[in-house]
Image (cartoon, coloured by chain):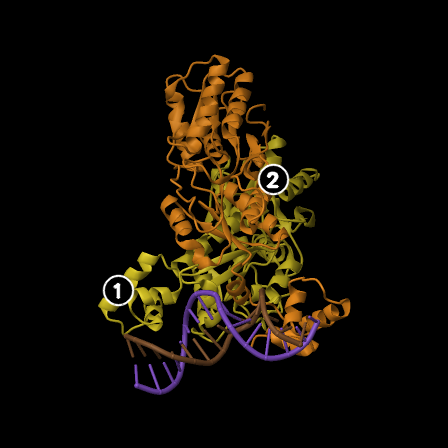
Chain colours: A orange, B yellow, C purple, D brown
Amino acid sequence: MAIRLSDVAARAGVSVKTVSNVINDYPHITEQTRAKVEAAIAALGYRPNVSARSLRKGRSDFIALAIPEMASPYFAELGAAISRAAKRRGITVLIDQTEGEAEAEKLVLDGMRGQLIDGIIFSPITTAPTRIDLAETAKPLVLLGERHAGGGLDHVAVDSVQASFDATTHLISLGRQRIAAIGVGGGAGTGSVRRKGYRRALKAAGLPHDPSLELAGTGYHRDDGAASMRELLTLPDPPDAVFCFNDLLALGALRTLAEAGLKVPDDVAVVGFDDIEDGRYHSPSLTTISPDKEWLADNAVALLLDRIAGTGEAARCDLTVPYTLQIRESTCG
Amino acid sequence: MAIRLSDVAARAGVSVKTVSNVINDYPHITEQTRAKVEAAIAALGYRPNVSARSLRKGRSDFIALAIPEMASPYFAELGAAISRAAKRRGITVLIDQTEGEAEAEKLVLDGMRGQLIDGIIFSPITTAPTRIDLAETAKPLVLLGERHAGGGLDHVAVDSVQASFDATTHLISLGRQRIAAIGVGGGAGTGSVRRKGYRRALKAAGLPHDPSLELAGTGYHRDDGAASMRELLTLPDPPDAVFCFNDLLALGALRTLAEAGLKVPDDVAVVGFDDIEDGRYHSPSLTTISPDKEWLADNAVALLLDRIAGTGEAARCDLTVPYTLQIRESTCG
DNA sequence: CTGAAAGCGCTTACAG
DNA sequence: CTGAAAGCGCTTACAG
């Protein structure tokens, strides 16, 4: 029914091996032979069967990207960038929504989709530091986001402590005195690492550390940001600035401030983290830490493919993603 | 190296066939045998090789979702819903960013990823009505979005004409007289279908049709909406309401209005289409047509799987997605 | 370059 | 239920 390699060979009047050589771009093929084969492929509309190829070669040229949820703008933008970076290298990306730690680990440990995929780029859920004892994982794995307990894994991320320090320092340089933080969490996850940078900045500026200004949230969505901001507004002495640990939290906080009739940035200045498109078009537009997502995607894919090929250095890599602080209306209206 | 079916069989002391029967949930297996096999599977950490299975069965339980871009919130939300709906049925979704008509058609005609996938859900780019002569496509295909030229394909979409009529009528009921439309396009695509509903509503209300209020855009992103709105504001007699053909356009338009210092909805009321989360948290929150994305995802997947299985009715299906008009601050502040 | 053949790991008649 | 075997469509030594 489907056209097979042997059909192409028959039509071109060459051997199966030769067709395979043409398809896989092997050397020692005369231009004439190549042309003949390519003509046959085109005439028959032949497409190699990837299942057969992958079964035989033990490689599929598929990689997985495991993210908490693809509907979240940051992950949607990241997924798009990673898909493009992979496509450029002839690789297809399978996107997996882990929706939580247990699922994610299960996916990885479950042997990677029945050996279909060659490796995985794994972005653990931001709310909980995942126990990744995956060093002994069967297939190559590159970790995204905050460095998690365990180490020993290839890892690509922004320097979150430094970036958070910069974000907070920006607020301080604007003369803000009571700077809140939204998205604080324990463990080794995002909420903890970014708090470290936040606290360092306060300390460096000689500002007091007020625990009531540190809002621990349940998640990193707009509604969490809105709820945390509402809580901050009930304080006897509310903040004059807020550093939100991602843009979604910041957008939620802005919503609450708008509902409360407060002026941004005059009454409260707001900074986010991620630089999703949403924040650029918001009124006021959102000041935020902007990681270079293209750089991240390209380097994560390249690193993973190095591992799959078994080339590159043996030592584990720790790549630091460049970022900038994008100053917009939410701090400098 | 990898554990094979025969290893499991050896360990469990049964035949290969029996293990296969257990894995595939075939009948006529005693509880005792099943338990023995499952114990062996667990002990060895066996995972079936999907390439081998797919090669043999001619089915992979993979489907593709082809969308213009996954970083666009509507498609990100849709992709997430479709992934979940498929997962519930044991199916994995491969997401393809077509980034344009030519690519998309190429993908489909190119034989669907070397026969890996069993079928495709295809959401053609909204800016151009795609010539889909895919009825003779090798694999089952379900079309999303506006009905395109050709017909004869399974299709799942909202009644865009009616929804656009409702959106425009809502604006009229608020007493608006000069209602603009952003995102107008030719052909049979979104921009044309939604304009039809828009024009009908004006006509039904006896409002004049002013061509200068119909803005044809190059795309459906925030920047297109912002640009169109700027253009509308240069009119000698600017509009007092705008129906944007998607939420991203509306968000861009809102940004322009904010920059111009105009009040929404007092000066200009704005309606969108899609109900992305972004619009719900915007200030002002966005009035919009809200298609039931879960319904859409579930029915599109179910329909495609019916086709793949060869069950269900022979006649082509045309499923209409339920929607509601979500009235929010951008029209009723 | 060619040609014949083995084998990747499954599923599936087939004979018992 | 078992057991031996064929075959899905490739890639890859192997001998020429």
- What's the chain of the residue with tag 2? A
Residue lying furthest top: A206
Residue drawn 35% across and 56% down? B45
Q: Amino acid at mark 2?
A: Trp
Is residue B295 something that shows in the picture?
A: no
Residue B36: which disc? 1
* Viewer-proximal residue among A87 and B11: B11
Residue A281 lies in what quarter of the image? top right
Q: Is residue A125 above or below residue B320?
A: above
Is A283 left, or right, of A37 in this rendering? left
Residue A132 image point, x, y percent: 40, 41
Question: Does label 1 lie on the same chain as label 2?
Answer: no
Residue A224 image point, x, y percent: 41, 35
Q: Secondary structure at mark 2?
A: helix
Say how many tags the image has.
2
- What's the chain of the residue with tag 1? B
Residue lying furthest right: A32
Residue bearing mark 2: A295
Residue A15 image point, x, y percent: 66, 75
Quadrant in which the N terminus of chain B appears: bottom left
Q: Is residue B211 above or below residue A50?
A: above
Between the C-alphas of marks 2 and 1, the distance is 50 Å
Q: Secondary structure at mark 1?
A: helix
Q: Is residue A137 above or below residue A55?
A: above
Does the CB distance between marks 2 and 1 fall below 8 Å?
no
Residue B188 image point, x, y percent: 63, 61
Residue drawn 44% across and 36% down? A151
Q: Amino acid at mark 1?
A: Lys
Residue lying furthest left: B32
Is residue B67 something that shows in the picture?
A: yes
